[in-house]
């Protein structure tokens, strides 16, 4: 692993909360199955505890290995969209990662960023943007609120990022009938997703 990935992995594995660079904006991360760490992350942001977060893998094949229930057409589309600036809302029939799912355990938000320095990270994180709830996203490390940087267990500087959050795409019905929808415009334009869908179906 790179030194950054090694430090990041150690922080998450030990129950810490990290500020890290994604391929979009700076994020906060913790272990997705550690209630105390998730509670700290939400408290740092001032995020309502019933609001879901995404689970982020740093390698697409690790994500697919952890979610073997992904069906063929959905997986084929994800192969075209990931890694990249997309958060995919997926069916979650086995109720995986319940701490990230909030009040809807049947929906999982999945991210696989294109971050070369962290792609050897061996396990997933629960992640959210490194800002106070409702505030502007952080393009640079200095844009992350000082109290979040101070109280996090690890702060990784990735330089200046794109500054636009991920595009949120609802794929919960995609396998069934090909229906999909962009719920939040972000880094990846809708027409790029439309092209990926056309190549899949």
Image (cartoon, helix red, strand yellow):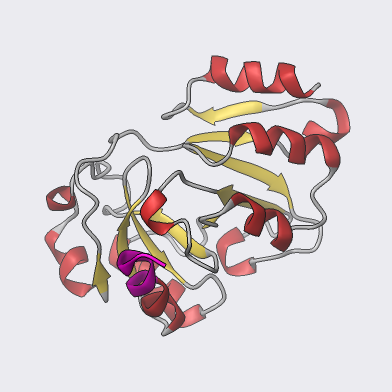
Specify whether 184 is left or right of 142.
right
| Horizontal and vertical percent position of residue 67 | 74, 58
Q: Is residue 195 above or below residue 140?
A: above
**Farthest bottom residue in view:** 14
Magenta segment main secondary structure: helix
Residue at 58% x, 39% y is 82
* Quadrant in the rendering for residue 183: top right
Specify whether 81 is left or right of 154.
right
**Farthest front residue in view:** 1
Q: Nearer the viewer, residue 72 or 174?
A: 72
Residue at 47% x, 27% y is 188
Q: Nearer the viewer, residue 136 or 193?
A: 193
Residue 7 in magenta?
yes
Quarter of the image with the C terminus in it: top right
**Start and end of the magenta stretch?**
1-8
Q: Nearer the viewer, residue 25 or 44?
A: 25
| Horizontal and vertical percent position of residue 10 | 39, 79
**Farthest right residue in view:** 176
Residue 189 in magenta?
no
């Amino acid at each position: 692993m790179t030194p950054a990935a090694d430090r990041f992995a150690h922080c998450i594995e030990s129950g810490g909360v990290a500020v890290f660079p994604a391929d979009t904006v700076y994020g906060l991360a913790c272990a997705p199955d550690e209630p105390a760490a998730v509670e700290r992350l939400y408290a740092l942001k001032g995020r309502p505890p019933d609001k879901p977060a995404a689970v982020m893998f740093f390698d697409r094949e690790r994500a697919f290995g952890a979610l073997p229930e992904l069906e063929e057409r959905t997986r084929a589309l994800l192969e075209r969209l990931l890694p990249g600036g997309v958060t995919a809302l997926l069916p979650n029939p086995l109720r995986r990662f319940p701490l990230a799912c909030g009040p809807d355990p049947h929906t999982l938000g999945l991210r696989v960023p294109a971050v070369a320095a962290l792609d050897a990270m061996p396990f997933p994180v629960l992640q959210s943007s490194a800002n106070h709830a409702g505030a502007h996203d952080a393009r640079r490390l200095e844009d992350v609120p000082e109290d979040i940087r101070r109280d996090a267990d690890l702060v990784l500087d990735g330089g200046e990022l794109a500054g636009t959050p991920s595009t949120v795409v609802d794929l919960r019905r995609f396998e069934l009938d090909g229906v999909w929808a962009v719920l939040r415009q972000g880094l990846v334009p809708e027409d790029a997703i439309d092209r990926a869908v056309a190549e899949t179906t």
